[in-house]
């Protein structure tokens, strides 16, 4: 049933080719597959059998799982922030402009009043510095 649902899902997605913006492909596929499986399971059995199966399976995700995941993410964000704060001023500036403001190298070179290639090199050097600072924490 699972393999058929996955295959049907990809066929439906290919045929519909919706142009809706997707923020997370993984989340989109998981949600679509969940609903597809639920519909197939529901259509193949009576409501009573479905509720019995759900109770029997006992599929639950602990709230603790999400708390631990969130704490891990926050810890990583703190480490990244700490590493960025330890960069020299120009490297901090280019990281901010390129990553947080999503500027192109042309725009960055104009803002920082530097050459295009210098902007690329400075950003690359900033990433190398960030990696080493992040890994040494």
Image (spheres, rainbow, N blue to C red):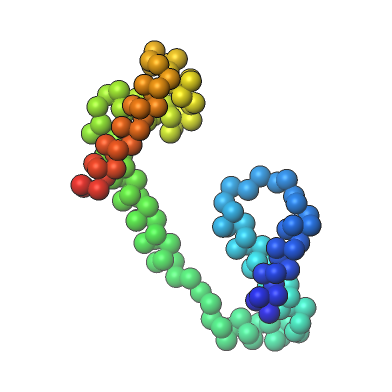
Query: Quadrant of residue 86 in the image?
Result: top left
In this rendered view, identify the residue nearer to me: 132 or 18. Answer: 132
Report whether residue 38 is seen.
no
**Residue at position x 34%, y 56% from top?**
72
Instruction: Indicate the quadrant where residue 38 lies.
Output: bottom right
Q: Is residue 57 above or below residue 70?
A: below
Give the tally of numbered discs: 0
Residue at figure coordinates x 57%, y 57% from the top left: 27
In the drawing, does residue 90 fall left or right of residue 119? left
The answer, for residue 122, to whether it is visible in the render is yes
Quarter of the image containing the N terminus?
Answer: bottom right
Residue 104 to residue 8: above or below? above
State the residue at coordinates (45%, 15%): 110
Choose between 111 and 72: the one closer to the eye: 111
Position of 75 with respect to 49 (left or right) is left
Counting from the top left corner in percent of width and height, residue 20 is at 70, 46
Q: Is residue 128 left or right of residue 28?
A: left
Q: Position of residue 19 (x, y in %)?
A: 73, 45
**Where does residue 135 sit, x and y in percent of width and height?**
25, 48
Q: Position of residue 69 (x, y in %)?
A: 39, 59
Question: Height in image: 99 above or below 1?
Answer: above
Q: Residue furthest front?
A: 117
* 119 sits left or right of 44 in the view: left
Residue at the image position 24 percent from the left and 42 percent from the top: 132
Name the residue at the left extreme: 136
């Amino acid at each position: 049933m699972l393999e058929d649902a996955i295959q049907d899902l990809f066929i439906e997605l290919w045929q519909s080719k919706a142009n809706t913006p997707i923020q997370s492909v993984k989340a989109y596929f998981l949600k679509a597959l969940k609903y597809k499986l639920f519909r197939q399971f529901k259509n193949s059995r009576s409501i009573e059998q479905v509720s019995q199966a759900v109770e029997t399976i006992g599929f639950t995700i602990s709230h603790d799982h999400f708390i631990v995941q969130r704490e891990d993410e926050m810890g990583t964000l703190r480490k990244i922030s700490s590493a960025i704060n330890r960069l020299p001023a120009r490297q901090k500036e280019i990281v901010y402009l390129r990553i947080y403001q999503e500027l192109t190298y042309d725009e960055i070179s104009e803002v920082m009043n530097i050459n295009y290639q210098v902007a690329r090199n400075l950003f690359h050097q900033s990433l190398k510095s960030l990696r080493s600072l992040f890994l040494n924490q």
